[in-house]
Image: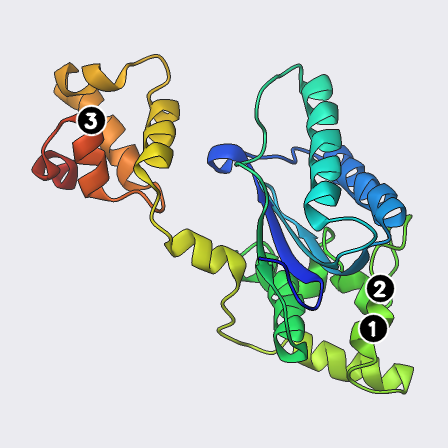
Amino acid sequence: MKSKSGIYHIMLRGANRQEIFHDDEDCLKFLDLLHIYKLKSEVEMYSWCLMSNHVHLLLKEGNEDISNTMKRIGVSYVSYYNWKYRTSGHLFQDRFKSENVENVQYLLTVVRYIHQNPLKAGMVTKVDDWRWSSCRQYYGNHDERRKLVDSDYILGMFSGDNILASERFKEFNEKVNQDQCLDHHLDKRRLTDEEAREVIKNLLNENEIANVKSLPRLQRDEILKKAKGIKGLSQHQTARILGVSRTLISKA
């Protein structure tokens, strides 16, 4: 659905949660592409964060549909990634995921949620310790070679005085919370049978789905144990797709 405000919280995730950034060069390349298409599409960027296997963006649609802008960014990065690592095929999981941001309260919630993503994942002990987010720019530490974030719009919601706005924003940005946004809801979503079948196929490598129930017990149980750890995949689905009993899965 189109956002009435034109603002979206967007997430790009690696296929099967694979890493999409392996080193600093990869992160910098993605930021360069963001900057290029932000200017071309006249997008306003309010917050961003790069994690090893996913990306969060909070932005306002520019002079074209947001789907087109995201497609340009995704295609360009995949082209770079496949060239650098001599790979081919899909890098991202389907198309991007998004949610509409229709009011100021939720806009600020998403900014904080994105900045606290590395903190809640246990990657850092302070939000501004994470290099790959817009948090440092909000705190006045411009350590990247491009201005990606339109921070004035968000800071202006805290005060017309720049110093006071920064202080109030920092207090809000670091507040302990139970915010639940896009990827929280996605993680709780059950996979469809079609999605589940694809995930299981990738898990099996060279084995066929039909052969799993005939594998030696240790090998079979190892596969079932890994399947149990896949978010959104129920044991009922796994049993039905692999043709084994739910008891075998629960015991694995």
The x, y position of residue 149, in whole percent, is 82, 60
Mark 1 and 2 residues: CB-CB less than 8 Å, in contact?
Answer: yes
Say whether residue 239 is left or right of residue 160: left
Q: Residue at x 50, y 55 (%)?
A: 183
The x, y position of residue 138, in whole percent, is 81, 68
- Secondary structure beneath label 1: helix
Mark 3 and 2 residues: CB-CB less than 8 Å, in contact?
Answer: no
Dot label at residue 242 = 3
Which image quarter: residue 160? bottom right
Which three-letter amino acid code belongs to the residue tagged 1?
Tyr
Which three-letter amino acid code belongs to the residue tagged 2?
Asp
Q: Nearer the viewer, residue 100 or 245?
A: 100
Quadrant into which the C terminus falls: top left
Q: Nearer the viewer, residue 65 or 215?
A: 65
Q: Nearer the viewer, residue 92 or 205?
A: 92
Q: Residue at x 26, y 27 (%)?
A: 223
Which image quarter: residue 159? bottom right
Which three-letter amino acid code belongs to the residue tagged 3?
Leu
Residue located beneath label 1 in the image: 153
Colour basis: rainbow
Say whether residue 149 is left or right of residue 176: right
The x, y position of residue 26, in whole percent, is 73, 34
The x, y position of residue 244, in whole percent, is 12, 29
Residue located beneath label 2 in the image: 150
